[in-house]
Amino acid sequence: MREVRYAGFWIRFLASLLDTLFLALPVAIVIYFLSDGNWFDFSQYQQNMMMAMSGNTHALDKQPQTSMQWEMLFEITTLLVTLLFWKRWRGATPGKKFVHIKIVDAKTLKDINNIQAITRSFGYIVSTLAFLLGFIMVAFRRDKRGFHDLLAGTVVIYEEETI
């Protein structure tokens, strides 16, 4: 049995950025157009950006209106697409696949099951709401597990290290 190489903070961060570009952004574009522009007030975002770039300290005083119905559709769709990728690509999303890492069961190093996938996804919420500490802890643990990994019993490793 070979030694397991855990995927650390920065490689996972890069995979997350890539997933935002290749997974979440396309879903967001589709939902924005499906909502006929009613998901959020894009013009208010533009106005805030213009004010901020001109040095106006009140640029963020007025926040764009967001439709919770369309926001929930985005969140659920992104979750389902992520779960589909995890199932199809055995624990990887496009970003993870690109950087050759994957999510596996922490004890067996085998593919994760549906319960682990769902638990891990909801664990992202907790990791985020706790001032991102659930993600930051990846940088400081020997096994490179975040809070969401601990909840789900998962670990992220380099693909070539699977058993």
Image (cartoon, helix red, strand yellow):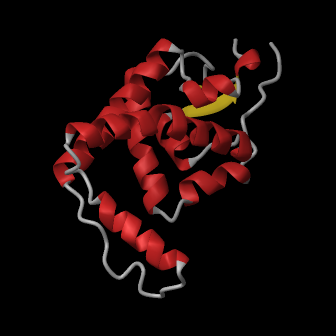
Q: Position of residue 115 (x, y in %)?
A: 37, 27
Q: Is residue 111 left or right of residue 45?
A: right
Q: Is residue 19 visible?
A: yes
Q: Quadrant of the N terminus?
A: top right
Q: Does residue 53 sit above or below 83 in this rendering? A: below
- Choose between 114 and 48: the one closer to the eye: 48
Quadrant assignment, res 123: top left
Point out the residue furthest to the left here. Answer: 69
Q: Does residue 52 sit above or below 82 in this rendering? A: below
What residue lies at 70% left-to-right and 46% top-to-bottom? Answer: 9
Q: Is residue 31 left or right of residue 23?
A: left
Q: Is residue 106 visible?
A: no
Q: Position of residue 117 (x, y in %)?
A: 43, 29
Q: Is residue 43 left or right of residue 68?
A: right
What residue lies at 72% left-to-right and 51% top-to-bottom? Answer: 139
* Numbered disc total: 0
What residue lies at 73% left-to-right and 54% top-to-bottom? Answer: 140
Quadrant assignment, res 61: bottom left
Q: Position of residue 133 (x, y in %)?
A: 57, 60
Q: Quadrant of the C terminus?
A: top right
What residue lies at 48% left-to-right and 88% top-to-bottom? Answer: 57
Quadrant assignment, res 41: bottom left
Point out the residue furthest to the bottom here. Answer: 57
- Choose between 80 and 136: the one closer to the eye: 80
